[in-house]
Amino acid sequence: MEAIEVPIRLLDHGLEAPAYAYPGDAGLDLRSSIDIDLEPFERALVPTGIAAAIPHGYAGFVLPRSGAAIKQGLSLVNAPGLIDSNYRGEIQAIVINLDPRKTLSIQRGDRIAQMVITKTPVISIALTDELEDSVRGAGGFGSSGNT
């Protein structure tokens, strides 16, 4: 598998750099650089203490961590969050506590999200008056018959 190099700037030297939990993982764990308590359904912008220089032709996608989602109700409001290749500011996650009863406590250093970096081709738009037919056609929500 081809590896790409992504320069990461540690803005908070007390935190671990993003890393894969296991070989073969797609997502690099991102950590909170702050302590914060979230009441049920409360959301907040949480800094991760890093900035990245994602290469042109790639993008970063910030996604929820499944373990934190099922165990704590921690999710992301805008999942996936998009990091464009020309962005050089701090990567932050818009987190939300989806537990209807419990306050969620995030501690500095906790893994709060994961970042997947993937190729993103430049798209050339071709305006047309008609589109090629497909099996699905214009069928939208629920059109497959599966609920």
Image (tube, grey):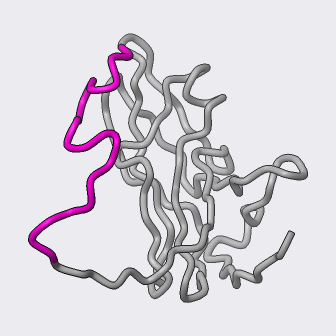
Q: Residue at x 39, y 36 (%)?
A: 96
Residue 78 point in image, percent of width and height: 35, 49
Q: Residue at x 62, y 51 (%)?
A: 114
Q: Going by the image, does 104 lie left or right of 9? A: left
Q: Quadrant of the N terminus?
A: bottom right
Q: Residue at x 61, y 76 (%)?
A: 11
**Camera-nearest residue between 26 and 90:** 26
Residue 31 point in image, percent of width and height: 64, 53
**Camera-nearest residue between 78 and 36:** 78
Q: Quadrant of residue 72?
A: top right
Magenta-drawn segment: 128-147
- Is residue 142 inside the magenta stretch? yes
Q: Quadrant of the C terminus?
A: top left
**Camera-nearest residue between 40 and 23:** 23
Q: Is residue 56 above or below residue 22?
A: below
Residue 59 point in image, percent of width and height: 52, 73
- Is residue 4 inside the magenta stretch? no
Q: Going by the image, does 120 lie left or right of 135? A: right
Q: Tag count in the figure?
A: 0
Q: Residue at x 68, y 79 (%)?
A: 8
Q: Going by the image, does 95 lie left or right of 11? A: left
